[in-house]
Image: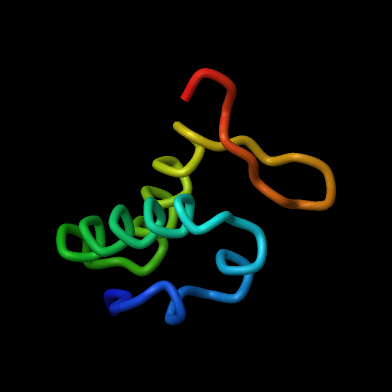
Amino acid sequence: MPYDSLNDLPDNVQNSLPKHGQEIFKEAFNSAEEQYDDEETPFQVAWSAVKEKYEKKEQGHWVRKEGD
């Protein structure tokens, strides 16, 4: 199911990613969800999109990569 708003994202996404990262996740997930029939692939696509701009730091929080 696509996510209509950032508030609909899973708790682990909301609690660990900044707003911009959440927006990237939501857009990538929704796009992949339209293309794939399984449940896992859209999550993989969304996290891959986040990892292009963000990196995971201590305590599980994500920060924007330097230079982006």
- Residue 45, how many percent across, how many down? 37, 48
Q: How many labels does the image show?
A: 0
Query: Which color mode does the image show?
Result: rainbow
Residue beneath the point at 38% across and 57% down: 23
**On the image, which quarter does residue 43 sit in?**
bottom left
Residue beneath the point at 66% across and 59% down: 16
- Residue 52, how many percent across, how many down? 45, 32
**On the image, which quarter does residue 63 sit in?**
top right
Q: Which residue of the protein is positioned furthest toward the left in this rendering?
A: 35
Task: Report the side of 53 relative to 4 (left or right).
Answer: right
Task: Report the side of 36 relative to 41 (left or right).
Answer: left
- Residue 68, how many percent across, how many down? 47, 25
Q: In this view, does 58 lie above or below 60?
A: above
- The quadrant of the rendering that contains the N terminus is bottom left
Q: Nearer the viewer, residue 45 or 3?
A: 3
Q: In this view, does 14 lie above or below 52?
A: below
- Residue 3, how many percent across, how many down? 32, 75
Q: Which residue of the protein is positioned furthest toward the top in this rendering?
A: 67
Residue beneath the point at 58% across and 22% down: 66
Residue beneath the point at 43% across and 81% down: 8
**On the image, which quarter does residue 18 sit in?**
bottom right
Task: Report the side of 48 relative to 56 (left or right).
Answer: left
Q: Which of 48 and 13 is in front in this view?
A: 13
